[in-house]
Image (spheres, rainbow, N blue to C red):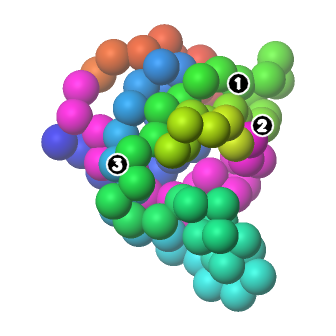
Amino acid sequence: MAEISLRRMKVRQTGTITSVKVGGVLGQRLREMGLVPGTEVTIQGRAPLYDPVALRVMGGTLTLRNNEADFIMVEVAEETGVSLDR
């Protein structure tokens, strides 16, 4: 298993959040959206210019900017998905 930032995940890849490495208002907002350690997330898709990213979390869909996704560390098990990273 590897730990990467949520931004580096591929489309249709699933992982478990291990940490949120930001405090303040942004950290609080991410945690209030349910992005806390132990939560499973799946990348649903990305916009044409790769920003924002759509996530499937707890049965709902969220979108995050890439600069926000950089603060969320995720443990991923497999190398599945479609790479759209530049």
Q: Quadrant of residue 86?
A: top right
Please tell me which of labels 1 and 3 falls first in the chain: 3
Q: Does the residue at mark 2 contact the one at mark 1 (Cβ under 8 Å)?
A: yes
Whether the magenta-drawn stretch holds residue 7 is answered as no
What label sits on residue 16 in the rendered view?
Answer: 3
Query: Residue at left 47%, top 50%?
Result: 5
Q: Secondary structure at mark 2?
A: loop
What amino acid does circle 1 point to? Answer: Arg
Residue segment shown in magenta: 63-78
Q: Nearer the viewer, residue 4 or 45?
A: 45
Label 2 to label 3: alpha-carbon separation:
20 Å
CA neighbours of label 3 inside 10 A, class few (<14), some (14 to 19), many (20+)? many
CA neighbours of label 2 inside 10 A, class few (<14), some (14 to 19), many (20+)? some
Please tell me which of labels 2 and 3 falls first in the chain: 3
Q: Position of residue 32 (x, y in %)?
A: 65, 70
Q: Which residue is mark 2?
A: 52
Q: Position of residue 56 (x, y in %)?
A: 57, 35
Q: Does the residue at mark 1 contact the one at mark 3 (Cβ under 8 Å)?
A: no
Q: Quadrant of residue 37?
A: bottom left
Please tell me which of labels 2 and 1 falls first in the chain: 1
Q: Quadrant of residue 34?
A: bottom right
